[in-house]
Image: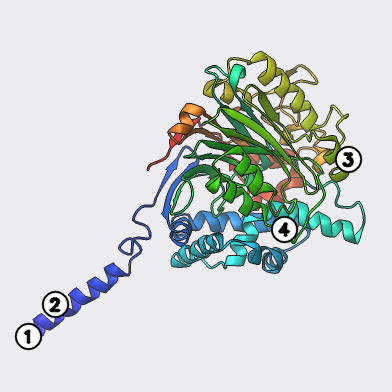
Amino acid sequence: MKNLFVFSIVIVTLFFSCTNSPNKKGRLAKAFRENKNGWINVHLEGSPSDIGYQHGYLLANDIDTSIRAIAFYLEHETHRDWQFYHRAAQNFLWNNLDREYKDEINGIVEGLQAQNIKYDSLDITAYNAMEELAFYYVPMLDNIAKPGSGNNKAPGNCSAFIATGSYTKDGKIVMGHNNWTEYIIGQHWNVIADIVPSNGHHIIMDCMPGFIHSGDDFVISDNGILITETTITQFYLFDSTGLPEFMRARKASQYSNSIDDVIKIFTTGNNGGYANDWLIGDTKTNEVAKLELGLKDYQVWRSKDTAIIGSNFPSDPTLIKEETTFNVNDSTTSPNARKKRMEQLVLIDLKGKLDAESGKQVEGDHVDALQNKDANNRCVICGHIDEDAKGCSEWSLAPFYPMGAVQGKVTTADLAKEMKLWAHMGHPCGADFIGEKFYKLHPEYEWQSKYLNNMLSYPWTLFSSSK
C-alpha cells in the first residue's frame, strides 16, 4: 500500500507539473524561435495575451539586454533616466492604448516574469515608444523650457523605396528599406517576427525584441498590404494627448485592407510622434502611395506607375514650413545627398529593372552623389557616420558618431504573396563595425562600449512565414 501511495503522489505531481507548464497550457505550443544569420526569427500565434507571452518568454534575455542598452543610451543623450520614460508611459501612453495591445504588452511582461526577468507593462510601453518619447516628447519639453532648444532633435533614419508599374522588372511592386540608427540601438533591431493574431491579418515584420510594432517599419500583411517609411528630419511638434505612434503603426499593419485604411488609421488620433513619410503598397491593386504625416499637416501621393523614394526629406512645402526646421536647399545634408543618389539610382539607372536583387543593391549603395564617387559617410544610402569627419549636424551628431545603416530588407509582390522577405543584419554593404578598433580611433565614444562592441554584417537571408 505504501508503494502504491507513493506512486499515486508521483503521478499527481507529474500531472499538475505538466498541466501548469507553458507548453501544455498551449501558450507556447504554436510558437518557436530560431537564430539565423544575425536575426532572431520568431513565430507568434494566438490571442493578444498569448502572442505577448510567447514573445516575452522566447526573447526574454534579448528584451532585457535591449532595454538596458536603450535606457543607458537615453540617459546619456537625453539627460532623462528610465524612470522619466516610465512615468511618461503612465501619464499619457498606457491609457491611450487599445485593450488588445494592453493585453499583448501584459502578456510580454508575464512571459518575461516566467523567465525571472522583472519588468512591468509601463516599462514595455515606454520601450515601444522610445522614438516618440525621446525624439519628440523630450524636445517638446526642451522647447517649453527654452524656445528653440529642441528644434533639431528629431532624427532622420532610413533609406527606402517602393516602386511599381514601368519602374519594376515585372511591373509589380518592389519595396526596400535600410534602417539608419545609432549602432548601440540598431544592433538590437534584429528580430523577424511572424505574427498570426486571433483578430486581423497575419503579418511578418522586422522589429526589436519586445516591440509589438516594427519600429523602423518594414511590414507585409497576408492581405497584400506593404508598409515601410523614412523619418522626417528636424520635425519638432508633438501632442501627448494623441494616440501613440507605435500603436497606430501596429494597428495599420494588422487591420488595413487597403491604402485608404492605412492612411485612416495613421491619421486618426495622430500625436505627431515619429513623424514619417510612409511608403505603402497594395499588391491586390498594384498601387503604391506616400503618406507624409506631420502633426497638423499631411499629404498623400499615389500611383500605379511610379517609384517613390525616402531618405528623410519632407516634400510638402506647408509641412516643411510649419512643422520642421529642415533646410531643403542644403545639398550637403544626409537626407538631400541621399535623395539625389536615390533619384539617380531608382528613378533612372534601375528604372524597369527593379526586383529583389537590384533592391538589395540599392540598400547597400555607397556612391556619394555630391562627390560622384564611392564613399563611407553620411551621404551614401548605406550610411557610415562613424567614418564621417563632418558628422551629421542636422541630426545633432558629432563627427564619427557611431550611427548609420544597421540592417536592410527587400520584398516583392510575388514574395509578399508567400509572406517572404529578404533581410540583411549589419551594414547592407557587408562591412563590419568592430568596437575595439573604433574606440581606439575615437575614444570620445568609449562610453558606449558598455553596450556596443561589434556589429557584424551577415549575408542576405530569405525569411518566410511558418504558417
Tell which of 327 and 300 is nearer to you: 300
Q: Secondary structure at mark 4?
A: loop
Q: CA distance from mark 1 to mark 3?
A: 87 Å
From the viewer's perspective, is the residue at label 2 or at label 3 nearer?
3
Tell which of 173 and 109 is nearer to you: 173
Mark 1, Cα crowd under 10 Å, few <14 / some 14-19 / many 20+, is few
Q: Position of residue 210 (x, y in %)?
A: 54, 55
**Amino acid type, label 4:** Gly
**Amino acid type, label 2:** Phe
Mark 2, Cα crowd under 10 Å, few <14 / some 14-19 / many 20+, is few
Residue for badge 2: 7
**Amino acid type, label 3:** Lys
Q: CA distance from mark 4 to mark 3?
A: 22 Å
From the viewer's perspective, is the residue at label 4 or at label 2 nearer?
4
Q: CA distance from mark 2 to mark 3?
A: 78 Å
- Quarter of the image with the N terminus in it: bottom left
Residue for badge 1: 1
Mark 4, Cα crowd under 10 Å, few <14 / some 14-19 / many 20+, is some
